[in-house]
Image (spheres, rainbow, N blue to C red):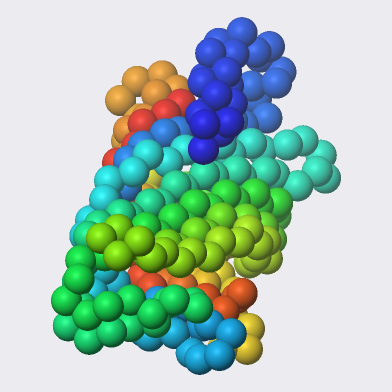
Amino acid sequence: MRKFVVILAIALFAIPFLPQKSQALGLEVAAGVWSQGPSGDISYDGNLAPGTTLDIEKDLKYDKKTKLFGRIKAELPLFLPNIYIMATPMKFEETGSKNIPFTFGNQTFNANVPFHSKLQLDHYDIAFYYSLPFLKTATMGKLNAELGINARIIDLKAEITQNTLGISESQSFTIPVPMIYAGIQVNPVKFFSVELEGRGIAYSSNHYYDFIGRVKIRPFGPIFVAGGYRIEDIKIDHSDIKASIKFKGPFAEAGVQF
């Protein structure tokens, strides 16, 4: 995420100095905050036995967290695909308790003893997409639709520790997830637009869906402010981690668009 923030800052600083010809291609840079409300469950299977299914809210005690996110969208000329980059950090960390012993990985944790848990699920997207030919022109710029492919890099780490007993277990992995990307922008007037975008894939018993709805206002020049709602629905079984989790909540952002 730090690397993305640096790139974002450089891009924002450099925009005013771009030649007019480059700016005409289309560039959007934004940063904001998302209130991530988690729900669902997670388990980590050991070598000899399946892990205990832990409820995100009841057992791990996770609640809403507000995190920064950033995105860059560039429309390229000729037949080159347009590019959409987005970074979404996620991290939950709380102290929980369970009234029965439970297993996480190869470690069994004691009942009625507080435990500390961390769940990190940072993800980074890069999409290559095209706008549907002639739709924007035919509607005089009031409607645009996009379709393409998206690569999402998931950086996951799950850890549980009972400090009083000196026991701990964790698992981490980084995996790429190919997804379909689709977006729609409705611009009834110049300073106001409604946008919808989705990314998703389903395979075997796994799925990953990410939906964003956004209302955007341009008060003056290239500057815009926006608010909306985002929902992520994840069901994954990888490296003995099984998770069925949803994250949802409102977000707000600000940026520039040329």
Snapshot quadrant of residue 17: top right
Instruction: Pick the quarter of the image with the C terminus.
Output: top right
Q: Is residue 153 visible?
A: yes
Q: Nearer the viewer, residue 141 or 256?
A: 256
Q: Is residue 112 above or below residue 145?
A: below
**Measuring 35% from the left and 61% from the top, which residue is drawn there?**
166
Residue 107 in the image: state x and y as whole percent.
44, 76
**Measuring 53% from the left and 82% from the top, which residue is drawn there?**
46
Q: Residue furthest front?
A: 165
Q: Residue furthest top?
A: 17
Q: Is residue 116 visible?
A: no
Q: Residue furthest right?
A: 79
**Measuring 49% from the left and 77% from the top, which residue is drawn there?**
105
Snapshot quadrant of residue 10: top right
Residue 228 in the image: state x and y as whole percent.
30, 51
Query: From the viewer's perspective, is 215 left or right of 206?
Result: left
